[in-house]
Amino acid sequence: MPIESRRAGRHFLQIPGPTPIPERILNAMSRQMLDHRGPEFQEFATRLLASVKTLFKTSNPVVIFPSSGTGAWEAGLVNTLSPGDRILVVETGQFAVLWRNMAAKLGLKPEVLANDWHAGADANAVEARLKADKGHDIKAVCIVHNETSTGARTWIDEIRKAMDAVHHPALLMVDAVSSLAVMDYRHDEWGVDVAVAGSQKGLMLPPGLSLTAVSDKALAASKTARLPRSYWSWNEMIGMNANGFFPYTPPTGHLFGLAESIAMLMEEGLDTVFARHERLAEAVRCAVRAWGLEIWCRDPRSYSPAVMVVTMPDALNADQFRKLVLETFNMSLGTGLNKLAGKAFRIGHLGDTNELTVLGALAGVEMGLELAGIPHQKGGVGAAMAHLTETARPATAEAA
Amino acid sequence: MPIESRRAGRHFLQIPGPTPIPERILNAMSRQMLDHRGPEFQEFATRLLASVKTLFKTSNPVVIFPSSGTGAWEAGLVNTLSPGDRILVVETGQFAVLWRNMAAKLGLKPEVLANDWHAGADANAVEARLKADKGHDIKAVCIVHNETSTGARTWIDEIRKAMDAVHHPALLMVDAVSSLAVMDYRHDEWGVDVAVAGSQKGLMLPPGLSLTAVSDKALAASKTARLPRSYWSWNEMIGMNANGFFPYTPPTGHLFGLAESIAMLMEEGLDTVFARHERLAEAVRCAVRAWGLEIWCRDPRSYSPAVMVVTMPDALNADQFRKLVLETFNMSLGTGLNKLAGKAFRIGHLGDTNELTVLGALAGVEMGLELAGIPHQKGGVGAAMAHLTETARPATAEAA
Amino acid sequence: MPIESRRAGRHFLQIPGPTPIPERILNAMSRQMLDHRGPEFQEFATRLLASVKTLFKTSNPVVIFPSSGTGAWEAGLVNTLSPGDRILVVETGQFAVLWRNMAAKLGLKPEVLANDWHAGADANAVEARLKADKGHDIKAVCIVHNETSTGARTWIDEIRKAMDAVHHPALLMVDAVSSLAVMDYRHDEWGVDVAVAGSQKGLMLPPGLSLTAVSDKALAASKTARLPRSYWSWNEMIGMNANGFFPYTPPTGHLFGLAESIAMLMEEGLDTVFARHERLAEAVRCAVRAWGLEIWCRDPRSYSPAVMVVTMPDALNADQFRKLVLETFNMSLGTGLNKLAGKAFRIGHLGDTNELTVLGALAGVEMGLELAGIPHQKGGVGAAMAHLTETARPATAEAA
Amino acid sequence: MPIESRRAGRHFLQIPGPTPIPERILNAMSRQMLDHRGPEFQEFATRLLASVKTLFKTSNPVVIFPSSGTGAWEAGLVNTLSPGDRILVVETGQFAVLWRNMAAKLGLKPEVLANDWHAGADANAVEARLKADKGHDIKAVCIVHNETSTGARTWIDEIRKAMDAVHHPALLMVDAVSSLAVMDYRHDEWGVDVAVAGSQKGLMLPPGLSLTAVSDKALAASKTARLPRSYWSWNEMIGMNANGFFPYTPPTGHLFGLAESIAMLMEEGLDTVFARHERLAEAVRCAVRAWGLEIWCRDPRSYSPAVMVVTMPDALNADQFRKLVLETFNMSLGTGLNKLAGKAFRIGHLGDTNELTVLGALAGVEMGLELAGIPHQKGGVGAAMAHLTETARPATAEAA
C-alpha cells in the first residue's frame, strides 16, 4: 500500500468522523458481492431496511443513498421543495452555512437565522421568526442536531415545540449526520420531517452511504415539489425498496457493513451507546477545564457528546499544534472550520471508542500542549480519569 | 452474518456487474480510515487523482463522486445543460432508456433516436439527425458505450466522426460504466466531452463510487449551464481536488480500493486486459452458437466483450431458467431487462475473471439448459474450450 | 505484497490441500488476538473443544496442536509407544512411507506391510499379519485413511474387523489428514485409537493446526509409554483443556477459524459434505475415463472422494504438463509423489468446492492435454457434466 | 462470531503476548493459499528465509516451524543433545522453570542454577558453575533473554563472556521469544548457538509460528545428538529450505504475515524499534514509581523493555484487580506466574504499540487501582507523560 508509512502502533483518529471502524464491520464488508437483483440480496435488503428504522426511531421508510451525508441533504431539499421556496437555516456553525449554500445553489431562497455559534439553535428565536412569517412563506426549517464545527447540540424537541407554538406548517429538517447513534434521536416523537445521516460517524462505517428518515408530511410534499430530481428521488427509491430492491446499483459492501453496525448497536443497546458518549464527553470537558483552555461551546445544555471544540489561546495557531500532535504522537485531531479556522482544534470522541482510547487521546493533547509551549495547566488527563473513575459502573467496582 | 447460507464453494457471480472483487482489493479496502483533511490523505488523493486519468486516456480531470454510476450521469447532465435543453439519446437498450428518463426528470428535453437493439448505435443515423438540426438545438448526444442490456457495443470514434462530419457542436456524452477497463476507451483522442463510469464493473470494486472524465468543452459548458447543482458540481470538486481534498467527506475506503485496482490494471497492462476480455467473449459466443441458441446482438462488429445476452427459445421463461441455475449450481446469471425481460438471460464475463472461471460458468449454463429441458445442442463448453486452446499464449504452449 | 504477480481472475488451487479458504473463514481469522489466559478465551475454547468432537464422531477429547498434521503423527507415536516398539505400517503410498520413516527416526521399529499402491489397505493382509503375531509384538497398526499420493481410500471399519477377528490388542492409528470432513469418519464406532488430522484439507483452514482424536485405550497407553515427550504430551494438553486453557500459547487465529469451519460444516451437514465430495469425485472420474487416461487407483471400492491421481501416458512428463497448465490457465495441480513422481498428476477436489469449480478445473486439464500434445480423447468435461446433470438435486430440477 | 460480546471500542491487550496485530499483517494473512510445492511459493519462501536472518543478525539458517515458541525449545534440545545430557538452566523465572521441566521430560538432566527472580541471569554465577564443571559435563547453558514472568532481561553478551572466560564448550541456548524485534539481539556477534522465538510477540503475528536461529556449532552437534526427532529435525528442514521448500506442509498464512512483519520492522528500522520499546518501558516505570507500587525487577540494568511486572501490596489479590480492570475498562493485563501468582500483574508494552496506547493502558491501571481500593499515589499517568514529553523527538517539537 503506497500510503502506509510506518508509524508504530495504532493511529489515534480523533476527528469527528470518519470514526474508527470496528474489526467486525471491516470483516463484514470484506466479502464478495452478490446479485443485487437476486433473492438473497432481496431478503437481506428487506431485513436491513426494516432494522435501520430503529436507529431513527421511526416507523416510516429510511432512504439509503450511495452518497456522502451531503447528498442526503440535497435529496431532502429537492424532494420536498420548489424553485424559489424560502427556507430558514439556523446558523449554528459551518455545517449550517454549507447547508444554506447548497440551498442557494439549488435555486431556493435560504434565509439565515443568526445564532450564537457558542450554543445550539435558539428555539425562541426560531419561534419568533416563524411567528412573523404570517404568510407561511417559509417552507422548511433546517437545524443541525450536532454542530461538529462548534461542538454544540440543539435540542430538536424544543424546535418542534417552537414550531408548534406558532402553528407553522414548515417542514422540520434535521442534520443528524454526527448525532445518529451518538445521542438520542426520535424522528417520529419529535415530529421531524427529514433527517439525514451519514455512515462514517456514529455508525462506524466508511464514508459513502447516507441515510434519510422521512415523515408522511415530507412524502406528501414530494408529490408536489418541483425541484428537478432523479438520482435523489425518494419515491422511486421507496417504491423499489418495498420489494427489497433499488432503482440503481446499491452499495452492497456498505449495506453489509450497515447490517453489522446495527447489530452491534443493538447488542450494546442504544441507551448504553448514548450514555457512553455523554460520559466520555464529560471526561473530555474535565480535561479541557483542568488545562485552563476554553471550551468553545459556552452553553452547558448545548455540550456535544460527540466532539469537543477547544479554543486556542490568542495568537497561537491551532493547525500548527495539530501538526505537531500528528507528527509526534500519531494522532489526528480535527481542524477548526470557518471562523474557527486556525483558532480551535477539535477532539472527536464518537463512534466505536471507550475510556482508555479517549484518555490516550487526551494524553496526546496534553503532551502536545507542553511541547508546543501553549500556556496551560497540567492535570487534564488526571481530571478526566477522576470523572471516569467516579462514574465507573458499580457492578464492576464491586468486583475487587 | 445473517445473509450467508451455506452453499459449498465459490458462488459464480456472472452478472454484468458488480463483478467479483479480487482479494487484493478487498484487503486494500479493509483498513482504518484516516483524516481526510490531513497530509497523508492529501498525498494519497493527489497521486490517485493523477493515476485515474490513465484509465480514461485523458489529461483532463476525472471527477470522483461517492455515488453509483447513475449519479455520474446526473452530474454530467446538470453540470453542462440548462432547463429545456434538447439532448439526443440513441436508444441502444435499457440503459439508454434510463438515461433518457433521467434527463426528462431533470427538466431537459430528451429526444430518442431509435436504434436497432440488436446492435450498437448507428453512427449514420446520428449523423443524419444532427445534419437536420440546423439550429443546433441539440446540446448533447448521449451514447452508451457498452449496452449491458443487449450485449452490444458502440464504436465511439465513429460517433465522433459523424458529429464532426456535420460540424455539430453538441457535447458527446458516453456511458462507459461497463466498458471502462474492459474495452478500449480513449477520452481525449475520441473527443468525448463527458464519460461516466462506476466502480463495480471493470474496476472490480464494490458499487458506490462513480468516475467522470470531462473535456475542456464540457468544463466550459459548466460555466453557463443553468440546471441547479450542488452535490454534483464539478467545479467545486475539481477546485478542491487540485489540492488533494474534496468538498465533502470522500469515500475513503473506495478510494483505497481504486488505488489498488489501478495498480492491478497497470500490472496486467490495459491492452492485455482488453485482449483478455475479447478472447473470453469469443469463447462464450462459441458456446452459445454450439448450443444453437441465439446471441441477441446480431451485429458482429457490435459484440460486447463484457456481457453476452442469450435469447431463450420462444415461450420459455428465462427467469425460471436463471432460478434453476442459481439453486442448482450456485451461479447468478443476469436477468433480461426491459423488452428482454423473461426472454433472455445474460452472462457477465467482465472484470477479474479468466478462462477456467468462464468455462465453469458455461458448464453451469449448459447443464442448466439440460435440466430445464430447453432445446439445445450439447457441446457449448467444448466449443469454448476449443477457442481458448487455439488462442492460448504460444509461449506457454511451448512449455510442454 | 511482493509475491503477487498479476494473473487475472481466481487461481484454481486444485492440489489435495491446502484447499481454498472460504471468505467466512478468512474473515473469522482476521481479528485481533485476545488474552489466552482470560475468561473470554476460556469460554470460547471450552465450546470449541466440545464441538470439534463432532467432526471425529467421538465423545473423547480431541487434542489440538499448533503444528502441521505431521506433528500430530509424531504426537500419536510418542504418547503411546516406547523405544523399540514394533508398529505395523501398511504401505498404501507416500504418506504411509513418511509415517514409517518418522517412526524409525523416533526409535520405533516400523514394519512395513506391502500393499498394492493402486488400492487402499488390504484388510485381509492386515489380519494375516496380526494373526501371525502371536506374541503381540506389534503395538500399533498405522493406516492412512485417504492416501493423497495415490487417490485410494481404506475402509477403516474393515481394518478394525480384521484386528478384532484375531483379537489383536495393537492400537489402531489412522491418518485422517485428508479425509476428515471429506468422507465419513467414525472414531468411536470404528474403534480407532488415534486419528490425526490437519487444518488445511477438509477443514478449509490455512495449514498450521493439527487435531488428534484419542481413545481411552490410547490414553491408557500414554500412562506407560516411554518415548520422551513434552510439547506433544496429550496428558498435559487434555488436563489444561479441561478448564479451557492450553499448556503453551495456543494458535488463537487458527482456533477462530476452526470454530467458523465447524459452524460451516454443521450448516451444510456432514452427510451433505460427504455426498458432495463423492459426487464431484465421480464427475472427475467420468472425465478421466472419457479422456482415455488411467486412473491410478484401480480398485473402485478404494476411489478417493478427495483427490484423483491420473497416470500420464508413457514417457511423458507430468510435471511439464503441470507447469504448462499453471502458466497457461492459472491452475495448480498436485505433483506425483514418490514412485509416481513425474508420472502422474493429481487433481484435488476437496474442501470448499462445487460443481462449477471442478468443471472449470477439468476444462483446464483437458485444454492442457491438448496444448501439451498428450494423446487423449476429448469430451472429459462433457462426461463430467453429464454425471453432474444426472445427479443434480431433483428439488431444483423441478424448478424449471 | 459467537465469542464477540459488544464492548465498545478497542480492547487494550496489554499482556506480554500475543500482542496486537497490525492491520497490515491481518490483511497480508487474509489471502488464499497457494501450492506450497509450486514456483511462486518457492520464490516467496526463498526470499523470506533470507530476510528472516536479519531479525536475528545471523548469517546462518533460521528454522521456521509450525508450532508455538515452546516447540522451538523442544527442537533446540532434541537436535543437539543426547539422552542423559546435563544442561544448565538459569532460573530467572517461570519460563526458565518450564524449559527445565521440558528438558527433564525429554530425558535430559537439567541442572537449575538458582538466580534472583528480581533480576536477569547472573553471569558471574554462570561462570563459577561452569568453571567447576571440569569434565565439561554440561552440554548446554539455557538462558531466557527476556523473562516475561519477572520483567527482567539478561545481557546475553555477558553470559557469552562468562562461558568464554572459562573456555567452556557448552552450547549457549537463548529463549528470545519475547525479546526478538523488541530489544537488540545479535546471534552471530554474541556467539549464541540456539535462539528460539515465537510469532506472537515482537513480530506482531498470531501465535503458531516459531523461529530458531542456529550456529554452526549447534548444527555440528545435531549430527551426533541422539535424542529421537523427526518433526523437529533441523537438518531435514534446512535441507528442504535450501530449495525454498519444507519437509511438510508449511503454515502459509503465517509465512505471509511474517514477510509483512519483517517489511514493517525494516521500514521502521530495528534500532528505532528497540529505542521505542525502551522509551515506552521507562514511561511505564515512571508511572509505577509515581503510584508508589513496587517494580518486581529490582535491578535497573535488568529492566525489561517488553513487560512490566508490578507487585501488589500485601494481601491484595492481583487477579481480582485484573478482573476489575478487564470488566470495567476493557483491558487485559497479564497474570502473575508461578511464585508471583496472585501477587503481581503484568503490563505488556511490546510489539505494535506507541505512546498514546501505553498511556491509555496506564490510565486504565491507575483508575483500576482507585476503584479496587489499592493504596497508591495518583499521578502515574502524569509521570509517564512527563517522560514521554521530555523524550519526544526534537524534530517534531520544533514543528510548533
Image (spheres, coloured by chain):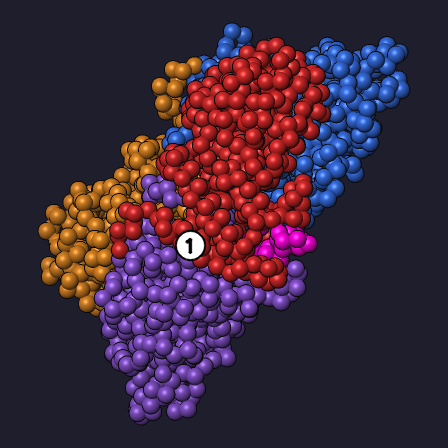
Chain colours: A orange, B purple, C red, D blue
- What is the x, y in percent for residue A294? 42, 40
Residue type at mark 1: give it.
Met
Looking at the image, residue C142 lies above or below residue A266: above
- What is the x, y in percent for residue A65? 31, 56
Q: Residue at x 48, y 73 (%)?
A: B185
Looking at the image, residue D269 lies above or below residue C361: above
Splitting the image into 4 quarters, where does residue D334 fall? top right
- What is the x, y in percent for residue A231? 29, 63
Splitting the image into 4 quarters, where does residue C248 fall? top right
* In magenta segment, residue C324: yes
B386 to the left or right of A141: right
User: What are the residue bounds of the magenta stretch?
Assistant: C312-332
Q: Which chain carries label 1?
A: C
Splitting the image into 4 quarters, where does residue B134 fall? bottom left
Q: Residue at x 59, y 52 (%)?
A: C4
Q: How crowded is mark 1: few (under 14 residues within 10 Å), some or many (20 or more)?
A: many
Name the residue nearer the viewer: B165 or B204.
B204
Q: Mark 1 points at which residue?
A: C385
